[in-house]
Amino acid sequence: MITVSNLEVQFGKRVLFKDVNMKFTPGNCYGIIGANGAGKSTFLRVLSGAIDPSRGSVTFGPGERLSVLKQDHFEYDDKTVLDTVLMGHEPLWNIIQEKNAIYAKEDFSEEDGIRAGELEEKFAEMDGWNAESDAANLLSGLGVKEDLHYRLMGTLNPKEKVRVLLAQALFGKPDNLLLDEPTNDLDVKTIMWLEEYLAQFENTVLVVSHDRHFLDSISTHIVDIDYNDINLFSGNYSYWYQSSQLALRQQAQQNKKAEEKRKELMEFIARFSANVAKSKQTTSRKKMLEKLNVEEIKPSMRKYPGIIFTPEREAGTKILSVDNLSKSIDGELLFSNISFTVEKDDKIIFLSREPRAITALLDVLAGVEHPDSGMMEWGVTIKHSYLPLNNAPYFNSELNLCDWLAQYSSDTSELYLRGYLGKMLFSGEEIYKQVKVLSGGEKMRMMIAKMMIECSNTLILDSPTNHLDLESIQAFNNSLTGFKGNILMNCHDHEFINTVANRIIEITPYGMIDKYMSYDEYIESEKIQETLDKLYKGERR
């Protein structure tokens, strides 16, 4: 259990949050949300003791152990993978080290024998005899192969290190677990394993994540950091978002009778609880969600960008035909034998176990790169806009926001451009700052404004959720589900894919799979996964 009392964090004159009082209790998982810069990671660092609050205190239950997902990927470079995981349980690791030091002595004394006996007793109480096998099981569950377990951390690539550090945080079932963006660099299979693990976790968990599907799968509560305050709500992210939107609509209808409001809210809760019952959450969590209190529902103060894509013309019957495309980079074959036809209203998610392959394919489809072989042809009615993975070249400019956007618009009047910038939450004198000083999230919003103003009927999107906060991701997602045109995209957000895509194409070095089905159906199909394993190995289907 974690108890927060009168907590305040202030940097200079800026107050992140103040007068925070709340308890985080065992058996619950708390998803922490808030706009970029609101203080989500700072809040976790205060709870972990990495930084001191300006005022107030954080306390834990007597004898409870805290574990934190480490962010320094070089801290353990001189340690083996298995030892790095074991070090996650500091009391157990200290006993192991002291035991080994005593047994290594040449002049083993009677006093050493007594101490060794005490250590062995503590070691057994901590289930130390199963520690290595438990650590190995965690590593395997997170996709770290057995042949890496005794390698030095310094020899691993960044993605492998992330998985080892996550295993370290989970090891020994800590009483309190703090995770900051734990799904970064994890594949779908590993994220699903982590969702299941945390959904069954019996102790206290606090998680910062931009992955809405992940938050929905694991969260019993949402911790909302907003406008210098922190509020706690029962339910997962979707419940928080939908209920806050409902409350906002009700707030706008000031004349609505209190009893009518209450009835509408109760119907919403009953409907939502029924949906949650289909999720992977444990029975106790389902029961808790069924008892949600209407008084907890409050409108969010958050601002969502106004993302609206309006094609200037409807697409004809011919969208795009692709025949036998192939592409290599630095002598490595990324894909070959890629042929497909895009039909009207197709919203396609491209997948690959090699991320460079999808970016290379989208670059080819957008006309940025040329294929090594093969042909592609767009229909004459098609106008496409491209959101590339790397947008840095677009912003290597002295232009201000207004002049930058004018490059892509037929109407260059400031009033017209301000309308689009305002939709992307840029206002006042802010529109006159230079684009080169924008943050990653601000650059993404400018790229979205560019696509909106181009009025294309086909969108090519490479990692559209990168650098965006949850509010922008939600607004972008909502816009694309109703988009009257075609979408070709690469994305890592489960909910984004599941709600937007109606067709899935996975590309490999030796061919492709093309299916009209939901993303959930696709990743859960063992037959499809077996076929993919063969394709990636270059075997015949």
Image (tube, rainbow, N blue to C red):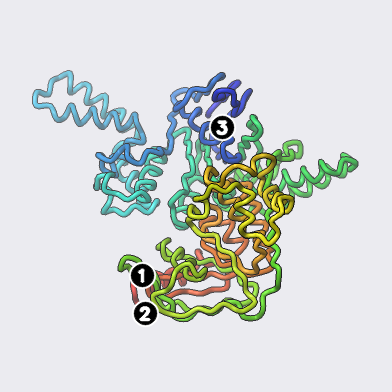
Q: Is residue 453 above or below residue 130?
A: below
Q: Is residue 368 above or below residue 154?
A: below
- Label 1 secondary element: strand
Instruction: Give the spatial CA distance, label 2 vs label 1.
Output: 21 Å
> Decide: marks 3, 2 in contact (CB < 8 A)?
no
Q: Position of residue 455 (x, y in %)?
A: 67, 64
Identity of the residue drawn at 74% across and 50% down: 415
Q: Quadrant of residue 152?
A: top left
Q: Amino acid at mark 3?
A: Thr
Which sits earlier in the primary sequence, circle 3 or circle 2?
Answer: 3
Identity of the residue drawn at 23% across and 25% down: 117
- Label 3 secondary element: loop
Q: Mark 2 — residue?
A: 540
Residue ranking furthest to the left:
106
Q: Mark 1 — residue?
A: 328
Instruction: Give the spatial CA distance, label 3 vs label 1.
Output: 52 Å
Q: Position of residue 10 (x, y in %)?
A: 56, 24
Q: Mark 3 — residue?
A: 25
Between 190 and 441, the one nearer to me in the picture: 441
Q: Amino acid at mark 2?
A: Arg
Q: Is residue 239 visible?
A: no
Q: Position of residue 341 (x, y in %)?
A: 55, 79
